[in-house]
Amino acid sequence: MTIVMKFGGTSVADGEKMKTAAALVSDTAEKDDVVVVTSAMAGITDLLLDTAKNVCSMKERDIVKFVDKIKKRHLDAASIAVVKNIDKITSAIERRSAELTETLMNMMDTGLTDQFGDRVASFGEKFSSAILCGAISDLRHSDWHHGDNDLIVVDTDFINPEPDMAATKENVGKRIVPQIKKGIIPVITGYMGCTHDGQTTTLGRGSSDLISSIVGACLDAEEIQIWTDVDGILTADPKVVPDSKLIPSISFSEAGELAYFGAKVLHPKTLLPAVKNEIPVRILNTQNPSSTGTVIFREAERTPEVVKAVTSKKGVTMLDIVSTKMLAAHGFLAKVFEIFGRHGISIDMVSTTEVSVSLTIDSRVNGRMKPVMKELRQISDVRMVRDKALVCVVGDGMRMVPGTAGRIFSCLGRHGINVECISQGASEVNISSVVDERYADEAVRVLHDEFFPEAK
Ligand code: ASP
Ligand code: MG
């Protein structure tokens, strides 16, 4: 079997953690072929992006100081994680540090461009992959690869890059597969790829998961493991519901809804290459490796629970849009969505009648809503209500079991929480209710009690 093991920033945060990760890789390699994908050490990407942003106001000596700090953190980690190959890894860190200094110095004149920003940000994974590879090499044969070096090809712009799966698969076939066949464990940087003309690009914050899913799909892996610092996906955010429990198995569509609406464990985009290739994605905890975590399957095993989880998204703005007589009802919705689309504002939830539509957007885009409101007012009466939250009840089983919406309504009603709007998508995986933001946590708690009474 081929297993892709991806380690997040917290799982490679220092030398000890790198050692733990390397031991986990070595254990898995006892019986399976392993390919590793790694994030940068926790906090490094933030530091790099912050420096790239401020580079124009920095002096040369600030840059030298900054790179020294980054170098020291990696040398410290390497001195703990790596024994046999420490000289090789130390000189790799030295080399990368010099390159980082040079890149930043060049940027002092040009300023921050998307290209430069991505180049600087990519150093985090370049450092961490060398150290993790060094730690694994103490136990087994390993080699590292940079995703931006003709490996992970992305086909669009720097703002919203999409993987070119065909080109990437060809590269993986040429560079990674032969190593696996020879018993070498490849360690691939997360986060980055290259454009067709060979420039470094990153795939967005948190995208090392996506890279692991791309690599898994190219290798037709049996499983993609996302090693992180939690046991898996829980029935609710434990900060809100302390007795929430681990979900052992969940479907891709359920996980996608959860990721989109608040559970921070995975970005929904991560799952796409895995879903297309029917590769299960398992979330595991480096601090608790004996737990089997949460596995995300195309079709989750049918469990007695109709509902898998309750989640919420705060910072939501609701728009109530009522068609005025000016426009016949049949063109109304199309026109409304066209306006949002043209202004690049994405809509989270929609609930419609023939002549009106209620929809929610992320409050962070409120600042870009002025021209949208102006256009909407030409065809409708619009009311914008802020400080709302979406409370989402997620579960594939709701398709089969009638009455879940009724239970949600009466549960919230019993607890005096007013539901301003409710929506159930055609897939029936998610029933979302709009409530006042200040009641969002309570709504999650009472719904969790309703659907998971045994957890109380
Ligand atoms: N290091 C990158 C970030 O912090 C990518 C990742 O960790 O997934 O966003
Ligand atoms: Mg991450």
Image: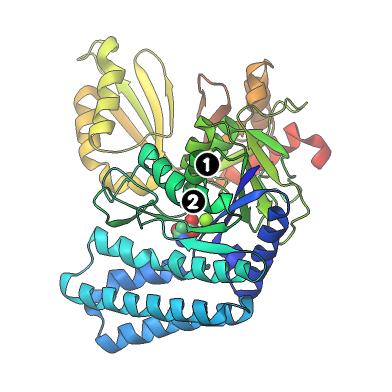
Which type of secondary structure does the marked residue at label 1 adopt?
helix
Which residue is most to the right?
Answer: 454
Please tell me which residue lies in front, 309 or 421: 309
Q: Quadrant of the C terminus?
A: top right
Image position of 89 with respect to 438: above or below? below
x and y percentages locating residue 211 in the rendered image: 47, 49
Q: Which residue is mark 1?
A: 219
Which residue is most to the front?
Answer: 182
Image position of 28 with respect to 390: above or below? below
Is residue 187 something that shows in the picture? yes
Q: CA distance from mark 2 to mark 1?
A: 9 Å
x and y percentages locating residue 32 in the rendered image: 68, 48
Please tell me which residue lies in front, 71 or 447: 71
- Which residue type does callout 1 highlight? Leu
Which residue is most to the bottom?
Answer: 61
**Is the CB atom of the residue marked by disc 2 within 8 angstroms of ligand 1's nearest atom?**
no
Which type of secondary structure does the marked residue at label 2 adopt?
loop
Q: Quadrant of the N terminus?
A: top right
Relative placement, left or right, of 150 versus 131 is left
Residue at the (67%, 67%) spot, across then down: 139
Relative placement, left or right, of 76 versus 294 is left
Marks 2 & 1, CB-CB < 8 Å contact: yes
x and y percentages locating residue 14 in the rendered image: 59, 73
Q: Which mark is residue 353?
A: none
x and y percentages locating residue 447 in the rendered image: 68, 35
Q: Residues within 10 Å of mark 2 (few under 14, many from 20)?
A: many
- Which residue type does callout 2 highlight? Ile
Residue at the (49%, 81%) spot, across then down: 90
| Mark nearer the N terminus (2 vs 1) | 2
Please tell me which residue lies in front, 229 or 359: 229
Q: Which residue is mark 2?
A: 176
